[in-house]
Image (tube, rainbow, N blue to C red):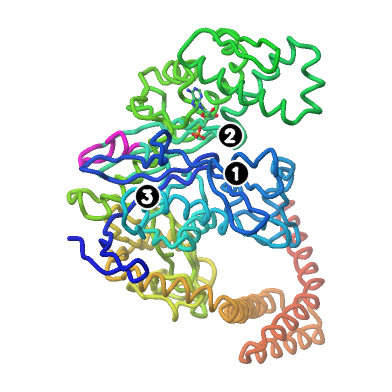
Amino acid sequence: MPTFSIDLKEGKLVKNSDLIVGIDLGTTNSLVAYMKDGAAVAVKDPDGKSALVPSIVHFLPEGGVLVGDEAKEKLVSDPRHTIYSVKRLMGKSYRDVKGFEQYFGYQIIDEDTESLVKIRVKDRFYTPIELSAEILKALKARIEGVLEQPVSKAVITVPAYFNDAQRQATRDAGKLAGLDVLRIVNEPTAASLAYGIGLHPDDNQVIAVYDLGGGTFDISILRIEQGVFEVLSTNGDTFLGGDDFDRVIMDFWADQNADLRSLLETDKGLRQEMRLLAESAKKQLSSSDWFEGRVGERHLEISAQQFETLIQPFVDRTIDACRSALRDAGLQASDIQHVIMVGGSTRTPLVKRSVAAFFGREVNDSLNPDEVVALGAAIQADVLAGNQKDLLLIDITPLSLGIETMGGLMDVILPRNSKVPARVGRSYTTSVDGQRNLKVAVYQGERDLVAHNRKLGEFILRGIPPMPAGLPKIEIHFILDADGILRVRAKELRSGVEQEVEMRSQYGISEEEMALMLIDSIQNAQSDMAARALLEARNEARSVLLATDRFLIQNAELFSPEEKAQITAIAGELDAAVQGEDKDLINKVLEDLNTYSAPLAHRALEANVAQALKGNKV
Ligand code: AMP
């Protein structure tokens, strides 16, 4: 039910929006879509021509920014102040993008190779998050203009392979643009929803989403089961797309006109004109057999057949990637029930034919391939708004799930933003000789100490046969199903002792609480790190002390009384340091103990080997 309030600035009555919009924040183009009368529609520019907003930000000399088509015009005339492909930099450190700097016409800062990249524009530094936020603001303004109402909630799509840092950066960009990002959705999931695949609870299928844009190619294999989208595999090439098709057409023309090649190297304007003509040729050849055009006095032409020969190697590379993705998913082409085409370059007939031939079925291409991801995002938004009640779409966990380990540390087993359903296992062991029971306490949250996170429950694995500390192999499995129900299973592998409990994790925690927990973890990162370092030093010291004890007993006859006394003395020092709060002292004494005991350990090893060899000869 919409509510109304007065917009004080304008003094007009405006509708408070319950609307959640879907946004495809792309490498080359972005767009925004929403549900209108039960159908998803992409918002077009004021002329009603195109829904695409080029993902380009231009900084004006007098201050302020241009976004979209206007910014695109500045790419040639003012490349240093015109930022494109910022999505390639999201959540990346300078080290990640090293080697690709020449691809960007603008300046990437390398002040600190481990930290996230920044982009220099004039005398200011911008994060990719801030720049993406400018694109999102433009999309927000566009839809607000059309609907004449404020919009503050969105679903934003990201590639399926985006990691936690990249997803988080996308979410932050949304926040910065004044959008409450209710969900980050995988692009192939959105594309599938746009075709209505996975919208019914009893839809069970395996699909392939083939996404060939201007500069990137992705193939994703998804399994859909009862509204749950599981990414089985992804593959692709982050530098392959329609731009390559344009380039080979230019090269083809340059090969036919000897003087053109040298001109193209020096004349930027001519180069740009040729590039645009090559792109029009490519587009026209998607629906006709022949293209003719002019650059200045020059007549240029190319046939569809010639074009297909030129791009065949690129198309072959995408098919190789499809093959790898299928192999990684453990599937055959015949297991795929739908092949969905995404991205402007899938309009190329050779691409469609090759993909259809590879999968042995017709491809889904009835929707506009540029819009399909945004349309799906709008559908996902509609589901979140509660307008499609019988459907539950879950694809990521909002907070990390883990267990308490020695010293009250949070050991994350299922990181925040993991895809669900998920199943992850990890091995643990005991810390005390002869330990028979093990407490497994499960927590949710982002802080390093469990005391600061939210406890979901605990249970005790009983009946572990007595063994020296460190010997039992205890596997802890987290199994998170589509409803957000977490099952935790603990099993001691040597004895087979097993226990399983179920806990509910997603519910009972509001978005606000979740946001607070995240802010908390950022604000306290420094003190958490110090606390973690101390606890880790203590844990290590304790296990070294235990090992030293055992070592002295097992090898008693190998060491002189002085050596034993010395080791015992340093161990006593370490024991005392562990009681204190000084992690540096613990680490220093630990090192002393290691340095002193290393030659003794070596001697013990040699003696043991000699003993074993003697045994063999007998
Ligand atoms: P996207 O990154 O998904 O927006 O895809 C943009 C790419 O699709 C660009 O390389 C366009 O040149 C290309 N494209 C757009 N329309 C066509 C068409 N009719 N035929 C072939 N390629 C096209």
Q: Is mark 2 within 8 Å of ligand 1?
A: yes
**As drawn, 66 above or below 351:** below
Residue for point 79% across, 73% down: 600
Main SS of residues in magenta: loop
Give the image location of residue 518, x and y in percent.
Answer: 46, 71
Tell me which segment is drawn in magenta. Answer: 192-203
Residue 185 in sight here: yes
Please tell me whether residue 195 belongs to the stretch shown in magenta: yes
Which corner quadrant of the image does residue 261 belong to? top right
Q: Which residue is mark 2?
A: 215
Residue 437 in sight here: no
| Mark 2 vs mark 1, CA separation in Å | 9 Å
Task: Say left or right for 478 vs 482.
Answer: right
Residue for point 54% across, 48% down: 67
Which dot, 1 or 3, sits closer to the camera? 3
Give neighbour class at mark 1: few <14, some 14-19, many 20+ (Cα, 10 Å): many
Q: Which residue is mark 3?
A: 143
| Mark 1 vs mark 3, CA separation in Å | 23 Å
Q: Secondary structure at mark 1?
A: loop
Type of amino acid at the residue the image marks with label 1 = Ser
Q: Which residue is mark 1?
A: 85
Instruction: Return the disc, 3 or 2, that comes first in the chain's sequence.
Output: 3
Which corner quadrant of the image does residue 248 belong to? top right
Give the image location of residue 267, x and y in percent.
Answer: 78, 28
Please tell me whether residue 552 belongs to the stretch shown in magenta: no
Give neighbour class at mark 3: few <14, some 14-19, many 20+ (Cα, 10 Å): many
**As drawn, 413 above or below 287:** below
Q: Secondary structure at mark 2?
A: loop
Give the image location of residue 522, x and y in percent.
Answer: 53, 73
Kindly indicate whether the residue at mark 1 contacts the one at mark 2 (C-beta within 8 angstroms).
yes
